[in-house]
Amino acid sequence: MNMSSVRRFSLLVLTGSLCASLSAQAPAPAPGAAAGAPAGPGAAAGRGGAGGGAGGRGGAPAVVFSTSQLLTLGQWNTTTLANAATAALTDLRTASLSGAKPKDLETKAAALAKAEQALATVRADLFTKIQASPDKLNAEQATYVKANGGLNRGGNTSPGATQAYSDYTGFTKIWDGKTFTGWDGETDAWSIENDAIHMDTAKKSGQHHVHFTGLPGVSPILKDFDFKVEFKASGGFNGGVQYRSRLIQAAHRQDKEPPLVNGVRDLKAAIADPLGKPLPAGITTEAAADAAGLPRGTPTRWQISGYQFDITNNNMGSLYEGQYRGVIVNAGEIVQLAPGGVKFIIGRVADAPVNFAKEHKGLDGEWNQLEIIARGNTLIHMLNGHVITVTTDDDPERRAAQGILSLQCEGGAIWYRNAYLKNL
């Protein structure tokens, strides 16, 4: 590259930088204000217009991508190569404005060209990869990606994503539907039928749990996670999904069930070690545990305590904590739990959340889709695509930052299937 070429290249870089800066600072035109302006992808009415995916300052995204597409295209601008190209461009701009020697400008221009070439190669490979996948970009999506240099344009504006409940991108299936591999519970209480794990209190009364013990590469001790499972119920059903929970009976603890201290159960040791010690091999029923002389629990040695997505007819999706705080958050509430056991209801997500549940007819009914999202002290319960409760647990004595996952039944009959976990 000769000196003349370097100067032309530098001028183009600076001019492009200035135009981009002015464009970013210019106010967005009001919808429809620029008559005859060319429409961007998805600019048709009802698709977000000029304010969404085309990089505007408001409104819904004009172009919608699936979760798997976003996860692939998210690498477009977050690679180290993108950072290197940006750094090389900055170096050239700085040198151009500081009166650097021609040789220095030539070196920096060559470095920028090399960085841009490397980035272009990676982007071309990504584009080829996604177009070869079952979830390839349609013409509108491809045009958007090419025109905008990736997903992002105009500050933090980015295309939206649709995520159906059945989209398990990033999730691991943790129950195979056929065996108890990775799970532990009473085998004379829980059974497997129709690709579902099932419990019926008409056959064995009482409260019963089956908990996740882990799979290769999947820890049973969960902190931040997403969990999806489907369920059906019948009769006077009462069950739930425990999470960030712990086995509390003496058979699993090193000493005994944690004592009550000023009316609050001291669970620090159990939270630190939610699984405790495993039962001896082959102990899968209360009768076998009795015969082995293991400490007796109430109601069973598989008893779980902790946060629970409650599955009941009159408070579906509420946040319950058995053997501890009881009903913490009713269905429909947004709650902040403060130190000292104080509860503040700060809003509502639904006035009649019971209507989100599908009719309960046992295996003849429809499957309900349950989702739990746990991030730090924030816990979200969803049912059939609707948010049921939002909880921020700011009570340091009572909250749990980690624990195990369990399915429960203590009334009627419940079936669970399609258990998927995204452990973060």
Image: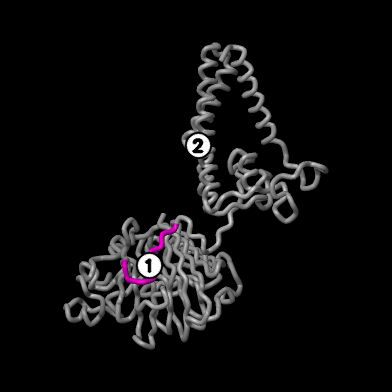
* Picture disc at residue 396: none
Position of residue 376 in the picture relative to residue 404 (left or right): right
Q: Residue 261: in sight, yes or no? A: no
**Residue contact between numbered discs 2 and 1, judged by CB atoms under 8 Å:** no
Please state which amino acid type lies under the numbered disc 2. Answer: Val
Q: Which residues are magenta?
A: 171-181
State whether the magenta stretch is mostly helix, strand or loop. loop
Q: Where is residue 273 drawn, in percent x and y? A: 28, 62
Q: Residues within 10 Å of mark 2 (few under 14, many from 20)?
A: some
* Picture disc at residue 122: 2
Q: Where is residue 408 drawn, in percent x and y? A: 39, 75
- Foreground of the two, 364 or 125: 125
- Foreground of the two, 185 or 321: 185
Please state which amino acid type lies under the numbered disc 1. Answer: Asp
3D distance between C-alphas at marks 2 and 1: 37 Å
The residue that disc 1 covers is 176
User: In the image, what residue occupies the spot 37% across and 77% down?
Assistant: 192
Question: Tag 2's secondary structure?
Answer: helix
User: In the image, what residue occupies the spot 81% across and 44% down?
Assistant: 33
The verdict on residue 174 being magenta is yes
Q: Earlier in the sequence, mark 2 or mark 1?
A: 2
Q: Where is residue 382 drawn, in percent x and y? A: 52, 67
Question: In which quadrant of the rendered image does the N terminus lie?
Answer: top right
The verdict on residue 177 being magenta is yes
Q: Residue furthest bottom?
A: 202
